[in-house]
Structure formats: structure tokens, C-alpha cells
Amino acid sequence: MNQPLLIQLSQQARFSASQFDWQSVGLLSERMLQIDPRSAEGLYLKARALKNHRDFVRARAHFEKCLECDDTRYDAAIELAALYSSMRRNGEAYELLSKYENLLSNSPHYLDSAGTTYIHIGMPEKAWPLYKKANELQPEIDVFQANMASCAIYMGELSFARNVYRKLIDNNPSHRQNHRHFSRTAKAKDESHINEMKALLQDTTVDSARNTPLYFAIGKELEDLGKWEECFQFYAKGCSAISDKIKYTPDEDIALIDKIIETCDAEWLQGSPVNLERGNHKTPIFIAGLPRTGTTLVERIVSSHSQVSSLGETMFLQMSLKESAGVPKQVPLTANNIENVAMGDLSNVTKIYMDALAYRIGTEPSFIEKLPLNFLYLGLIAKAWPDAKLVVLNRNPMDACFSMFKQVFTFVYKFSYSLEHLGQYYVAYDRLLKHWRGLLGERLIEVKYEALVENQVDVTKDLLEALDLNFEQGCIDFQNNTSPSTTASSVQVRSKVNSSAVGKWKHFEAQLKGLKAHLEANGISTD
């Protein structure tokens, strides 16, 4: 073995990596592996090159072999954990992070990377100390600061996050996402930050897509100040910019709803009883409903109970349904395949699901899965889990639709960026909810948002009783719950219940009249 040559090749490859010349990294690492096929450094560098060429399968194999050859390579372990996370092999990602995070104390890059993977697997409380340590070691790196600030919001450290974002904005005034995140950390008291953002909009060389974060941030702060007409104008600009980019129509999403209604009928529900093979005797509480209808609020209330933990929002249910039916992970559930899923053998769905989230299950006898989109699959959940609790949130449709319209959901809820699409989708959603009511009967636990915020104690008591949980005062004082929240409502849930959002749509009655007319024409009350 030619050790001096291996060292020379490693130095050359690492220099090439610093220049983002991944082709050279790949060639140099291959020469290293020709000299020594078990060179941990060569395997690591080859894996990095493969990863940056998006050959994730081979990259994973090389990182795995690197660790076989040298199990002290924390760099390979953290890279591999990130790949496992992207494949939704979250338990394996967690095992690697747990094993190696204590070796990262002098590596700000991998502290930050490990923190990001912890975020991806739904564990911001684990990410928080790693982000802070990375910033202690290299406080001048903007991306480290931004990641830490984002995590601070999840952890409820809003003042901390606000101060970090302010510093980032001062260092780079044109960074539009930092302006948006800064706007989320507190209510605007004046127009000073609004004016900063409006000044950026004067740059005519920047297109509307790049300005999208500013549109929503300006809209939010104008709404804070009660400037209703102007705030709506900016929300509309933001939604229009996203709509222009994604070119979405709701036809496929509505077709999925109609196929679910057609497939999941009473005969289907009663046929082929499921044999539970979950491998873990915990009671799941699925909280669903359209986004911005109070699902996070109810999650915080119920998870404040001593007998309940929360997983937050995961995609494990959809993953488990697809795996049980042999649908590839990367293929979405659509009208074309949902019938095969529903008509397939659901007996192993619970085990697949419970195995996938075993790394996060606590000692509490019940746990919450809160993903709004799961309202699509309530019938399948009911059939797969005879003892699962199904909670659905209802909110005034106008408030619900407007609240979705003004929220950035990336590309998850694509129907939310157009009032026309919102109206069309809401009608289909209402049709599905009525179907679930008829099919599931008393198994469906419905909570009305307006009733909850106006009569928190009584509605909470009723909800806990329906969930077979004893009343606990902590569920009323949920704002004292220090657990992290990574949802769009992560800021609001740090406050006590209030009714300030009830009827807010009426400030925009003129702008929403078309939506209102469409809903009412389809038999949906907007009162």
C-alpha cells in the first residue's frame, strides 16, 4: 500500500471538493480505492462525489462501507444519516446521530448537518444544542445562524430567533427569506420593517417568484396593523407568484377524493376484518382536517396530557399504506392507485407504521399523529386500527380558506394559492367529510374551532372524554407545554386560546365574495 500517495490524493480530492469540482473528487477517490479498496477516506470521498451527482443509492453504499472499514468516521455517519432521512429510514438515521453526535464537538459543519437531519426526522429538541454549538465554534457563518434561528422558533425561543434574524438582515438586507422569518417572530408594531421590505421590491431586476417571501411577510405585518385592504393585496401577489410557478389545477386532487368516496363504502369497511399486527400496543390519536383549522391547537391541548405524546406531522401513514400495497415510495397516492391500496391487505399497515416511528415512541400509552392531510385516509385508518381515535377539526369555511390563502405551505397544499382552487377543493373536502360522518359514525370525533376558543374548558373536557382520557388541568394550560412545534402554527401555540381569528375573513368580504358565492352555491354555509 502506498500511504504517501493516498495522502496526496486525499489532499487533492479535498481541495477539489472545496472548489465544488465533484468530477475530480470522484476520479481522485477512485484512484485511492484502486490502491486500497478499503480506504475509509477514499470511500468517504467517493460517496461525497456520488451524492453531489445525485447517485444516492451508490453514495449510501459507499458511506456504509466507509463505516465498516473505520467506525470512527463521524463525517461518513452524519452524511449517511442524512441519506437515510431522505429515504424515510428515520430510525436508522436516529441511531447514527445518537451514536456519533458526541464526536462532533470540534466540527461546526457536521454539528449543523446533524442538527438539520434531526429536524428532518422531527426532533428539533435534539437539533437545538447542536446548532448552538456550531454557532459557538463559527459564529460568522450565516447559514448556521439561520438554521439555529429556525430551530429556535420550533422550540418557542421567539425572542432569540428574532434577534438572530435581525442580525442576519442587517448583514444581508436583500435576503428575502430571512425577512419573512423575522416577520413571524412577533406582531408588527409599526411599519418600519414593512418599509424595509417594500424598498427591496423597488428592484425591478428581481422577479415575483423571488419576491414571494416578501409579499407574504408584508401582508402579515400589514394585517398585524389592521391595514386590511393593503395586506390582502400583498397576500394575493404572493399566491399569484406561486401559482404562476407551479401551474396547478385541483382536478387530480378532487379525483382522489371522489375515488376514495366511491371505494371506501360501508361494505368495504365491514369486509375482511383486519388482524392487528402492530408490534407495539399504543393507541394512536389521529388529528386531521384542513390546514389552519385548529389541528395544531388541539394537538397541543391533548399532548399536554400526561398519558399522551405527540409525533407532530409525519408522512409515515401514507408510506405504510403504499408499502402494504406495493406502491413505490416515490409515487404519490392518487385516484389511479388508491383503490388498490384500499382493497389490498391492510393487516400489516399498523406494524409497518409502528416500526417506522419506533425511534420516537415514548412511554405514554397514547400518541398523536397530526397531519391535516390524513383527513383523506380516515376510512383506511379506521379499518387498519379498530382502536385508533379519529379527531377532525371544523372551522368556518371562510376563515379556514382565507387562513390557508395567506399561508406559505411550500408545495404541499397547492390548492391554497388561488381562491378559485380553494373553493373547488373545499367543496370536495366537504363532500368527503360528510361521507366519513356517514361511514364512521361515532368513531369520528369532531371539534369545532370556534366552540373550542370560546368555551375552552367544556370543549376540552368533552374531547378528553371522547378520547378515554381523564381531565387534566395541563390540557387547559397548554401554553406552558414546552415541547417543540414544527407546524405553520408553531408561533401561535405558545399563547393562550383567544378568539381573535374568529370571523377575521369579514375584513376581506369584498375580496372573498366570489369564494363565498361558490361555497354557498354548493350548499355550504358560510355563517
Image (cartoon, helix red, strand yellow):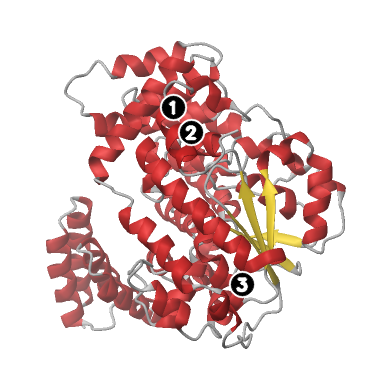
Looking at the picture, which amino acid does disc 1 mark?
Lys
Q: CA distance from mark 1 to mark 3?
A: 37 Å
Q: Where is mark 1, residue-wise?
A: 513
Q: Is residue 177 visible?
A: yes
Task: Assess whether mark 1 and mark 2 are in contact (beta carbons under 8 angstroms).
Answer: no
Q: Residues within 10 Å of mark 1 (few under 14, many from 20)?
A: few
Q: Where is mark 2, residue-wise?
A: 402
Q: CA distance from mark 2 to mark 1?
A: 12 Å
Could you tell which of marks 2 and 3 lies nearer the N-terminus? 3
Looking at the image, which is closer to me, 501 or 219?
501
Looking at the image, which is closer to me, 85 or 280?
280
Mark carried by residue 382: 3
**Does residue 471 sit above or below 46 in this rendering?**
above
Could you tell which of marks 1 and 3 lies nearer the N-terminus? 3
Q: Secondary structure at mark 1?
A: helix
**Which residue is located at x 81 percent, y 52 percent?**
462
**Which residue is located at x 40 percent, y 79 percent?**
340
**Quadrant in the rendering for residue 180:** top left
Looking at the picture, which amino acid does disc 3 mark?
Ala
Q: CA distance from mark 2 to mark 3?
A: 30 Å
Give the quarter of the figure containing the C terminus: top right
Q: Position of residue 129 (x, y in %)?
A: 58, 49
Q: Position of residue 416 (x, y in %)?
A: 40, 42
Total numbered circles? 3
